[in-house]
Every structure is written in C-alpha cells, then in structure tokens.
Amino acid sequence: MTAAGAYGLLGLAILAEITATIALKAAEGMTRIGPMVIVAIGYALSFWLLSVSLQRFPISLVYSVWAGFGMAGAAIGGWWLFGEALAPSALLGIAVIALGVFILASAMEPSAA
C-alpha cells in the first residue's frame, strides 16, 4: 500500500471515529437504537481502518494522529451539532494538538510495507 493510500485510510478511520463519538452523544445514554447502530458500525470500521493503517505506519504516528484529530473533530462536532461550548482556550488546544501531530508526522518515515 502506498503512503497516500494509508493516509487516506487513516483519514477515513478518523471520520468513522468522530461519527461514532457524535452518535454516542445522540444515543442519549444508549436509549436510542438508531444512533447506537451508528456507534457500533462507526467504531468497528474505525478500528479496522486503524489496523490497516498500522501495516504501513508506526503505531506512535497512527495512534497520535487518530486520537488527536478524533478528539478535535468530536469537540467541533459537539459545538456544531449540540451547541456545546467551545471556548477560545479549547480552540487553542485543538490548534496545539494539530501542530503536534504535524510535527510528529513530519519527523517519521513510513515503515516498509
């Protein structure tokens, strides 16, 4: 698999994780079946795509990108969809995480596949 393909799969893993996390909030304590189905499918898809990405990249890169951008996406999704507060300090934190992930990614070379 090419590096571009692996990054694409990692991006899809992040989107699936964000979708599942937002659906978890919408499930209202696991009382709504529709969102819970999205949660189960989203997390399963996310972990599968994450495992495929690990065939190409080191775990330190894959997990930090997935967790960092997943957290940022969930925070932004909570603000956008549920009206949750997103203070300027939270936005700064998201920017710092993105910068940290960028620095980590630029310092690593993909493992041979």
Image (cartoon, helix red, strand yellow):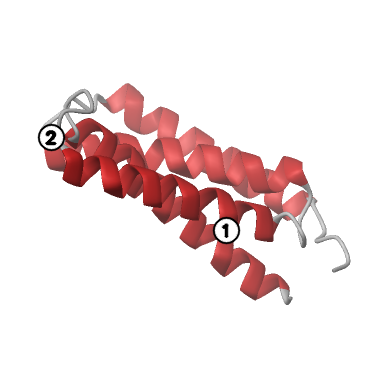
User: Residue 20, image x and y in percent?
Assistant: 34, 44
User: Residue 109, image x and y in percent?
Assistant: 82, 58
Which residue is rendered at x = 11% and y = 32% of the image?
A: 83
Secondary element at tag 2 = helix
Which residue is rendered at x = 39% and y = 30% of the image?
A: 92
What amino acid does circle 1 point to?
Answer: Leu
Which residue is rendered at x = 66% and y = 53% of the image?
A: 51
The residue tagged 1 is 49
* 10 Å crowding of disc 2: few (<14), some (14-19), many (20+): few
Secondary element at tag 1 = helix
Left/right placement of residue 45 relative to residue 48 reads left
| Residue, far left | 83
| Residue, far right | 112
User: Residue 110, image x and y in percent?
Assistant: 80, 61
Q: Which mark is residue 98?
A: none
* 10 Å crowding of disc 1: few (<14), some (14-19), many (20+): many
What amino acid does circle 2 point to?
Answer: Phe
Quarter holding residue 43:
top left
Q: Identify the image quadrant of the C terminus.
A: bottom right
Between residue 71 and residue 39, name the one nearer to us: 39
Left/right placement of residue 80 relative to residue 12 reads left
**Circle 2 or circle 1, nearest the eye:** 1
Quarter holding residue 55:
bottom right
Asked whether the beta carbons under mark 2 and mark 1 sit within 8 Å of each other, the answer is no
Q: Is residue 23 above or below residue 56?
A: above
Q: Is residue 106 above or below residue 20?
A: below
Q: Which mark is residue 82?
A: 2
Left/right placement of residue 83 relative to residue 56 reads left
**Which callout, 2 or 1, points at the residue further toward the start of the chain?**
1
User: Residue 95, image x and y in percent?
Assistant: 44, 38
